[in-house]
Image (cartoon, rainbow, N blue to C red):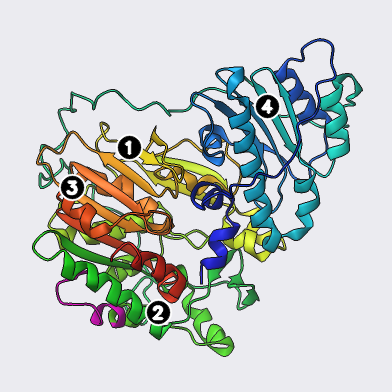
Amino acid sequence: MKKMFFKIIPLLTALCILLSAAGCGLKPQEETQSTAVNAGDLVQTLLGCVKFDTPLSDAGDVAALFFQNLPEHALVSMYSGSGYFADELVWITLAQESDMDQALDSVDAHIAQVREQFLSYIPEELDKIDNAQIWTQGVHIIVCITNDYQNAGAIMADPSTATALPSTEAPSTEPPTEATTEAPTEAPTEAPTEAPTDALTEPPTEAPTEAPTEPPKQLNEQGYPAIISETMELRRAGAAYITGNTAYERYVYCAEPAQYYASVVSNAARQLEGISDVYAMVIPLAVGIVFPDNLVPVYQEKETYEDQHARMKQIFSMMDDSVIRVDSYENLMRHRDEYLYFRTDWHWNGPGAYYAYETFCRVRGFQPYTMDQRRVSEFDGYLGALYQQTCDKDPALVDTPDTVYAYHPYSENAYMYFTDAQGNRRSWSIISDVSNSSADAKYYTFAASDQPFAEFYNPDVTDGSVAIVVKESFGNVLMPLLVDHYSTVYEIDYRYWEGDLVEFAKEVGADDVLFTNNLSMICSNYLIGLMDRIIP
């Protein structure tokens, strides 16, 4: 189950778990210098003269998402390593000195959340967290979490004491620049000439000039592309199995939670009958789609290897007839030899979400935009939660990190806002540039990651159509795809949102309500209970 996993991902907890009202009580370093210290120079000195347990990289635009309830116009630059280490160096610049107390409360809350996640995850990191060093001067705050905290504290107190580490090349620092946090004053007014005028318009296509020359695929006994492992080794690592350079989250069917989940979705469909169409997309896990065919018998020697499609059908069968089923299994299996899921994380990659989106479009009656019609961003160096969860820095996973494939909306005019756990509404990029983000933060490229509530607007779809997507983190990858077919899409993360789904659907006139939930979630009574509370 994912209840534990959600707690160990730094951004997910920092963004979406309600922060404790009590701060960490950490005191900033006293300013002992008779003359002001240049904050940027101090950051550079710390990067070059303090020993960190892991290489640090610039988190880029997503840095601001780690700090909730910062004063307006505060700018954040953050250097962090992999999620296996708590090390980080943060530089916050405020708009005015009077914002300092509010900003320090946000810093304390951030450190409290970092401590909470490592408490049960990697408690060896707690000492450095408990000794986090905080420096303030004027409108600047610098936070340093490291085992070398005594040296960091001495440098903050007097930068002249700094001694450069041998053969250390610190990343360059520039003053933090503001991310796209300002809400646009109005929606874009011009649509590209090639954009669709309504949700049902067929997108333009180009005929290929030549027939494809790829050799025929090798098929397995079920008629799907075969996946063959070069090694027969399969070992257990926590909640995952690892073979070669790939980790797979285990899956065991849970009958009682499955029935509970079906009843919750059915309840929503009954209450919204005649108001909104309710769709259920049950998302299969990697182990049921891309697990090597020749390793299934090896898996079965250890525990039951579930037929995920049979389990999906079983869950669908327990739902009311009014629920419209979105079964993406066959479409995913037809493309299972593609990069559908990550090797170091339990989530699906952009192509996996695309084929599920394609299935939804067919069920809904939309013409899907092809992958080729969409701009795609590639972000290398991703080491996801399955790697972090193994806690042993498996060399096979480290040496071959994942690449994130993020498909942008077809409509270049689409835009989004999100509302965080403190009620702050912000504009954000539907696909964020995470090129320089830490290895464990690359998945945050999709739709501002896990926020309680987000709004997506597409001025190129002029029919006034409205959809609501109820999701956990698997749903993030779908949002840039779905936004092309509605005037407005509202995204609700049931784990953190506090509203009434039925009343909200009535209020906004939702045409469609889509539940997008993965099979692991459907094994957790805790998570299903969180969904149940928003459907009174």
Secondary structure under tag 1 reads strand
Tell me which numbered mark, 4 or 2, is placed earlier along the sequence: 4
Report how far apart the C-alphas of labels 4 and 2 lie in the structure: 46 Å
Which kind of residue does numbered mark 1 sit on? Met
Q: Between residues 121 and 372, which one lies in front from this camera angle?
A: 121
Tell me which numbered mark, 3 or 1, is placed earlier along the sequence: 1
Res. 508 mark: 3
Q: Is residue 428 visible?
A: no
Report how far apart the C-alphas of labels 3 and 1 lie in the structure: 17 Å
Task: State if disc 1 and disc 3 touch (CB < 8 Å).
Answer: no
Report how far apart the C-alphas of labels 1 and 4 lie in the structure: 30 Å
Q: Between residues 78 and 411, which one lies in front from this camera angle?
A: 78
Task: State if disc 2 and disc 1 touch (CB < 8 Å).
Answer: no
Task: State if disc 3 and disc 2 touch (CB < 8 Å).
Answer: no
Report how far apart the C-alphas of labels 1 and 2 lie in the structure: 33 Å
Res. 141 mark: 4
Number of residues whose C-alpha sits closer than 10 Å to that of mark 3, classed few (under 14), some (14–19) or many (20 or more):
few
Which residue is identified by label 2?
257
- Residue 485, percent from left and from top: 19, 46
> Looking at this rendering, what residue extends furthest in the bottom direction?
301
Secondary structure under tag 2 reads helix
Rendered position, 444 above or below 39? below
Tell me which numbered mark, 1 or 4, is placed earlier along the sequence: 4
For image coordinates 56% across by 84% down, the residue present is: 298
Res. 416 mark: 1
